[in-house]
Structures are given as C-alpha cells and as structure tokens.
Amino acid sequence: MLNENYPHEISIGDVYFTPFLAIFLLSFLATLSTVIVLNKIKLSGYFYVPQYTFLAIMVLYALLIDKYLIRF
C-alpha cells in the first residue's frame, strides 16, 4: 500500500516535477555550503580530487534528505 503522506510528484501550475528535483537542489545547496566551509578552514587541500569529494558529499546529502525529509 502506498503511503500518501509523501508527494509522488510536485505540481507547479500544470507542470509536474519529480521529488528528486527538490532533493537534488537541496543537496546541491547543502554541499555548496559545506565546501565553502571546508575551503574557509583549509581542509579541502587534503583531498586528492576535490571534484570527486564534492560529488561524494552531494550523494551523501541526497541520501540523507531522501531518508529523512522528502521520500522519493
């Protein structure tokens, strides 16, 4: 049985968006703020490839947002 507490798609006007779009946007903003903090305290210099670290942090945030905020 489907749980009706969580949206299956987000409707803006007549256009339907998948919840993954909101998850992607929130995880991107959270990752961007985390990377800014890592750059300020100079911890990003310890990563071998910072681009992969950005993607890894973004995936972690996406999983956490999907688990606790917006169910996909």
Image: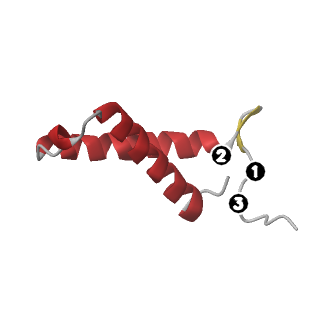
Q: Name the residue tied to disc 1.
A: 8
Mark 2 vs mark 1: which is more N-terminal? Answer: 1
**In the foreground, 2 or 35:** 35
Q: Name the residue tied to disc 2.
A: 19
- Image spot of residue 66 (x, y percent): 58, 56
- Image spot of residue 46 (x, y percent): 17, 42
* Residue 35 numbered mark, or none: none
**In the foreground, 4 or 44:** 44
In the displayed structure, does residue 68 sit left or right of residue 72? left
Q: CA distance from mark 3 to mark 1?
A: 7 Å
Do residues under tags 3 and 1 come within 8 Å of each other at their CB atoms? yes
Q: Secondary structure at mark 3?
A: loop
Mark 3 vs mark 2: which is more N-terminal? Answer: 3
Q: Name the residue tied to disc 3.
A: 6
Residue name at image x 29 percent, y 34 percent: 50
Q: CA distance from mark 3 to mark 2?
A: 9 Å
- Image spot of residue 25 (x, y percent): 50, 39
